Image: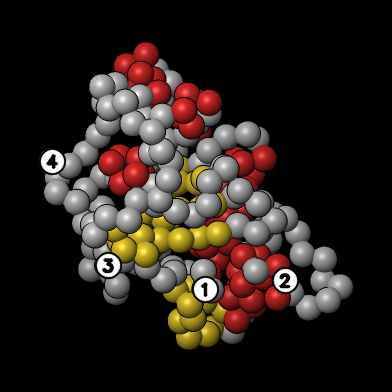
Amino acid sequence: MPAALCLGLLRQAAGIHRAGLKSYGLLICEPGTAGYPFAATGVVFLDSRKNRRNDPGHRAAFRAQGDYFRQFDDAGIVAPFHSHRRQPANFSLIDYRLHNPAFAWHLIISLRDPRRPVLQPFGVAKDRSDFGISDRDARQGSELAYYGPEVTPLALVAHGSRRALRRLTTTVHPTTAPAGTGRRACPPDPSDPGVPATHQPVPG
């Protein structure tokens, strides 16, 4: 993923988080692009204010997943990327059950500590018939990590200018910033042409 795209994704997700909302949407890439389908060249945020999770037709199914989903009315929104407002960057049981099998991977953005955002992609292999939750589930702990063989943690590899890569690294690992730089809680503006650099993994 381009480092500038990661920074923009984090900046917008952090702004939505500060507004008390959960972010979710699509990571996009044209078929035929190098690395497809595990590459992302763009992002589309869906409108967090139009969350249908609490519509009468959906609310009961989410509440049937346990106390966590009854306590927090924004828990359980799932798309090819979404943020966790309180949970770590795990791929939970409900994330697995609501992941669209048409997509090979899913990115979790944990903003539990907004000063140290965590980006964690997961490879997900599901049968197309294996999708959804029900108000008859009566489950507990659906917010906990799912360790089934269908889900594999992936490494996020960022590429771009050296400056953008440094900004991304110090955004997700603020303790690595040089003393006195005063790292900000929200990600910086990624717009910088800089000097091209090779692909580098972002520490998880």
User: Which residue reaches farthest top?
Assistant: 56
Measure how far apart labels 3 and 1 are at the Cα level. 19 Å
Give the Cα separation between the discs numbered 1 and 2.
14 Å
Q: Residue at x 27, y 31 (%)?
A: 133
Q: Which mark is residue 169?
A: none
Is 40 left or right of 186, judged from the image as shown? Answer: left
Looking at the picture, tell me which residue is in the foreground, 140 or 76: 140
Q: Is tag 3's residue or tag 1's residue first in the polypeptide sequence?
A: 3
Residue farthest to the right? 180
Q: CA distance from mark 2 to mark 3?
A: 33 Å
C-alpha span from label 2 to label 4: 44 Å
Q: Earlier in the sequence, mark 1 or mark 2?
A: 2
- CB under 8 Å between callouts 2 and 3? no
Taking the spot 49% from the left edge, 54% from the top edge, the residue there is: 89
First-in-chain label (3 vs 4): 3
Q: Which residue is mark 1?
A: 202
Is the Cβ of the residue at disc 2 closer than 8 Å to that at disc 4? no
Other residues around mark 3 within 10 Å, as few (<14) / some (14–19) / many (≥20): few
- Secondary element under disc 2, as helix, strand or loop, is helix
**Residue linked to disc 2:** 175
The circle on residue 36 is 3
Q: Quadrant of residue 61?
A: top left
Q: Secondary structure at mark 3?
A: loop
Residue 109 location (% of width, % of height): 51, 53
Disc 4 designates what residue? 129
